[in-house]
Image (cartoon, grey):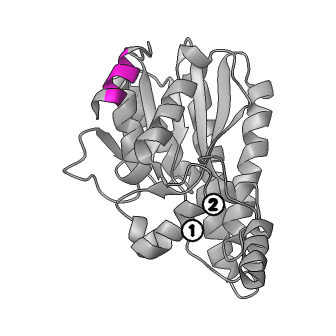
Amino acid sequence: MNKEREMLMSGIAIDLHGRTALVTGGAKGIGRTIAQRLADAGATPVVCGRSDADPDCPFDYVSCDVRNAQSVEAMMATIEERHGGLDILVNNAGGSPEADAATASPRFTEAIVGLNLLGPMHTARFAHRLLMRSSDGNIVNISSVSAIRPSPMTAAYSAAKAGLTGWTQSLAIEWGPHIRSNIVIVGYVETEQTEATYGDAEAQQRIAANIGAGRLARAQEIADAVTWLASPLASYVSGGSLRVDGGGESPPWRSMRDDTARRAG
């Protein structure tokens, strides 16, 4: 954490002491950064994943496949047994490899929708009882810019994330005022998998040049947004969609116009 950031965070009174937070897919990547940021604010993070516990993970780990309702129900029972309850649910687990919508198998499509939409539905459903007992029950769903613009080759993922917005907004009414529900729409983010996700350094530079902020997001910036939404500072924010995408992507007509101008010159 650089000095400028330390000064900024010291002036923001986010205190989550005494609160237990579940971050799905929180053993690595953005999820791990979110869990650490919540811990820095005083919360007790619990993370889950489909694999066995990572010995290098500093947080309480529960093995769970969020696509499976019975697995999620068992996880919530474990969290209640270990921690007495749950205050914050961050549905972070998700993602999708590329696949042509015309040839993707039904099994593939069901798996993608299961992870990115049904998973958050299952976790929210079985967390409901615990969150209702909290003084400020809170759900933060992690979505993607794929939910708000065309996403060829990841159509099932795009559809699932778009559905997650409707789910989030509906819960804000159905479960309010006891439980707040919000969504973070994430753009391009640097992680340990950046090259595998976005390509080599040259490809990443092209992506960055097309973003308003001129760079990819840092995982810490996503974690800050989640922590704010989960805190009392956002006490009147529910059913909201917070875009953390650096201003979004430049529209295609701009590059087409610039190419035309270059050819004319």
Q: Residue at x 71, y 62 (%)?
A: 158
Residue 46 lies left or right of residue 206; in this view the side is left
Mark 1 residue type: Ser
Q: Nearer the viewer, residue 222 or 210?
A: 210
Where disc 1 sits, the SS reads loop
Residue on which the image places disc 1: 96
**Residue 251 showing in the rendered view:** yes
Q: Is residue 5 magenta?
A: yes
Residue on which the image places disc 2: 114
Residue 202 lies left or right of residue 185; in this view the side is left
Q: Residue at x 39, y 65 (%)?
A: 193
Mark 2 residue type: Gly
Residue 21, image quadrant = top left
Q: For the N terminus, which image quadrant?
A: top left
At which x and y percent is residue 148? 76, 54
- CA gap between label 2 and label 1 equals 11 Å
Q: For the C terminus, which image quadrant?
A: bottom right
At which x and y percent is residue 44? 35, 26
Q: Earlier in the sequence, mark 2 or mark 1?
A: 1
Main structural element of the magenta stretch: helix, strand or loop? helix
Residue 151, image quadrant = bottom right
Residue 84 lies left or right of residue 56; in this view the side is right
The stretch of residues the image draws in magenta is 4-10
Q: Is residue 235 magenta?
A: no
Please report contact status of discs 2 and 1: CB closer than 8 Å, yes or no: no
* Vertical arrangement, residue 92 with respect to residue 211, above or below: above
Question: Please, which residue is most extreme toward the bottom here?
Answer: 103
Q: Nearer the viewer, mark 2 or mark 1?
A: 1
